[in-house]
């Protein structure tokens, strides 16, 4: 047989098959009554759901693209759960039994369905779509599909409703197992999901069944692989993993909880999860956030209308700088207090108790090492406690509390101490003071109220004590200046007093802060060759100094007589980062025997302030 004859026969056979199938599709509706089709669909629905369906619309055959029975207006209501409704349902029919006049349903597709899922305060879950337990593994149940449906999640504890729209999903049985896949939109965000329950019979009996869940979107990816049971609410345990490009976007998508200005960026989580009706426990937790990693455990509980979070975490390095926005102390330039409002409304959202141990913690310019700290949040107040930490070679202990005062205005309280730390780097990172060197101890107790840091600086009150030993005052050599002034008071004063260092054996300063002004109760710096005393005040609000003091040059006591110390008064004024230092003009004129020719404007010009 030639090739052309073979092709002709094949084409004729294919055409005949098409004609036969078309004929069957055309003729079959005349052999199947509407009552038979309706009965087959009703039976399939009862078998799948265990509920007597209510059908309001007509029943008709749809031939293409495949034989199907279409019914308009379907309602499932068992009197226990919220009713399930669909604008239309299409039941695909198996072709071969149809040729014998039998209607066997292969799948049920619900169009524009409305499904409600209610979560009670005790964790109980009620799904509006009833699904009957399979009586035997061989029970052949049609696949269930949803096209362009809507799902309403109602959480009694949160008193809110979340809507999933444009839901396309498919539920398929395999033995006693159930698999669901699909896609949906949530708050304008597309997402896909997949879940499987290995043994629905065990699950319905309250026993544990293997369970897998996958949820993916541009915002968040979540995976779970473990087991699930239903005992007075959903209970599950297994491996949990989550991944997000921006945790900030995830939180803002699900909550109006105010966040810090920056931070909460790239996020990854892995843990063994245990879920009950009112709690979630994560053990073996590994969490990466904004480049910082921590390991430990976390528990979330719900009770008495409140959510509480407890965590114990350990980290090699934690950079908390991204989260300090919203609690900003100074403007970006660091020369003025911040006017950014303190946002504290989120402090009452839940209760928090976190214990952190870290090899290194960084917050802006401040760096702590070997940190043992806790953070607690209760009744709208955040308390940070550092039980022990190394700061610039010393030991830091302290507590800071932030919350609303009795009058509803933000309130800050800080108390603590830093022992035996490096003054040069420590005071620079804490207050921008760069002139003191050596080892020292700082103790403070301060508090104030205000809408932002600048307002708090106006109300700041408390005490500050600073002591040091075996250090130096950088930027000036007091002994050299005193020797120069002793020889030629006026000519020496015209020279620049800046430069050099003043070594000291002992440093002591006590300040009392009242409404943003620090009064010096005692301030003294001394060595075997000189002594400096200070008095006056410093404005915390303007970050300025207005101090007066005396510098004394000490001499060894000569044999048979008393030493006459040389003493000069001086002024320290200007911003505390770089104050202006100058000798007291009146005192110098009194000391100079040749002061008369240069009294007046010439002397005041010579003694004009010079930066320290």
Image: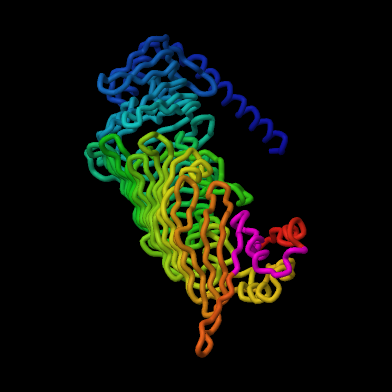
499 sits left or right of 138 in the view: right
113 sits left or right of 264 in the view: left
228 sits left or right of 568 in the view: left
Quadrant occupied by the C terminus: bottom right
Q: Is residue 519 magenta?
A: no
Q: Can the viewer see residue 401 in this picture?
A: yes
| Residue 526 image offset from top left, x and y in percent | 51, 73
Q: Quadrant of residue 303?
A: top left
Q: Is residue 175 above or below residue 430?
A: above
402 sits left or right of 608 in the view: left
Q: Is residue 385 above or below residue 467?
A: above
Q: Is residue 595 magenta?
A: yes
Residue visible at 52% across and 66% down? Answer: 533
Q: Can the viewer see residue 371 in this picture?
A: no
Query: Which region shows up in magenta?
Result: 568-597
Q: Name the foreground residue: 592 vs 481.
A: 592
Residue visible at 54% across and 60% down? Answer: 429
| Residue 440 image offset from top left, x and y in percent | 47, 69
């Amino acid at each position: 047989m030639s090739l052309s004859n073979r092709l002709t026969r094949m084409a004729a056979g294919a055409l005949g098959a098409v004609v036969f199938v078309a004929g069957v599709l055309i003729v079959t509706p005349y052999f199947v009554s509407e009552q038979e089709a309706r009965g087959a669909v009703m039976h399939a629905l009862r078998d799948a759901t265990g509920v007597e369906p209510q059908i309001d619309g007509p029943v008709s055959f749809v031939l293409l693209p495949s034989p199907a029975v279409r019914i308009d207006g379907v309602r499932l209501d068992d009197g226990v759960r919220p009713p399930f409704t669909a604008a239309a349902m299409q039941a695909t029919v198996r072709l071969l039994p149809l040729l014998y006049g039998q209607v066997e349903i292969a799948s049920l597709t619900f169009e524009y369905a409305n499904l409600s899922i209610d979560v009670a305060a005790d964790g109980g879950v009620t799904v509006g779509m009833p699904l009957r337990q399979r009586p035997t593994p061989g029970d052949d149940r049609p696949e269930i599909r949803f096209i362009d449906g809507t799902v309403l999640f109602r959480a009694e504890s949160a008193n809110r409703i979340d809507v999933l729209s444009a839901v396309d999903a498919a539920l398929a049985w395999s033995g006693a197992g159930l698999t669901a896949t699909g896609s949906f939109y949530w708050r304008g965000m597309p997402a896909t999901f997949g879940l499987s329950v290995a043994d629905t019979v065990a699950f319905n009996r309250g026993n544990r069944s293997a369970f897998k869940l996958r949820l993916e979107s541009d915002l968040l990816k979540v995976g779970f692989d473990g087991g699930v049971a239903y005992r007075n609410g959903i209970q599950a345990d297994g491996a949990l993993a989550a991944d997000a490009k921006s945790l900030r976007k995830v939180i803002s998508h699900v909550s109006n909880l105010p966040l810090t200005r920056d931070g909460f960026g790239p996020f990854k989580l892995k843990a063994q999860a245990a879920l009950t009706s009112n709690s979630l426990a994560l053990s073996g937790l590994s969490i990466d956030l904004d480049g910082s990693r921590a390991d430990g455990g976390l528990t979330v509980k719900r009770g008495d209308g409140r959510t509480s979070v407890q965590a114990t975490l350990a980290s090699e390095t934690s950079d908390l700088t991204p989260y300090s926005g919203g609690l900003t102390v100074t403007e970006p330039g660091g020369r003025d207090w911040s006017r950014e409002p303190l946002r504290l409304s989120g402090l009452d959202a839940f209760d928090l108790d976190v214990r952190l141990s870290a090899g290194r913690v960084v917050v802006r310019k401040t760096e702590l090492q070997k940190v043992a700290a806790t953070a607690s949040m209760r009744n709208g107040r955040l308390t940070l406690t550092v039980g022990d930490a190394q700061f610039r070679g010393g030991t830091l202990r302290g507590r800071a509390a932030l919350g609303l005062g009795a009058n509803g205005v933000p309130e800050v309280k800080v108390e603590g101490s830093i022992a035996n730390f490096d003054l040069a780097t420590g005071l620079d990172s804490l207050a921008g003071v760069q002139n003191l060197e050596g080892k020292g101890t700082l103790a403070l107790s301060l508090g104030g109220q205000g809408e932002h840091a600048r307002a708090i600086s106006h109300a700041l009150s408390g005490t500050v004590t600073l002591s040091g030993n075996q250090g130096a005052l950088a930027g000036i050599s007091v002994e050299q200046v005193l020797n120069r002034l002793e020889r030629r008071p006026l000519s020496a004063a015209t020279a620049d007093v800046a430069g050099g260092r003043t070594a000291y054996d002992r440093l002591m300063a006590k300040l009392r802060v009242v409404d943003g002004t620090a009064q010096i109760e005692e301030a003294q710096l001394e060595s075997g060759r000189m002594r400096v005393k200070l008095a006056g005040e410093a404005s915390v609000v303007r970050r300025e100094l207005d101090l007066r003091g005396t510098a004394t040059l000490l001499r060894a006591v000569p044999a048979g007589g008393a030493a006459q110390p040389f003493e000069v008064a001086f002024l320290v004024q200007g911003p505390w980062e770089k104050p202006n230092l100058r000798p007291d003009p009146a005192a110098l004129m009194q000391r100079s025997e040749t002061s008369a020719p240069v009294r007046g404007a010439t002397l005041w010009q010579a003694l004009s302030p010079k930066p320290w």
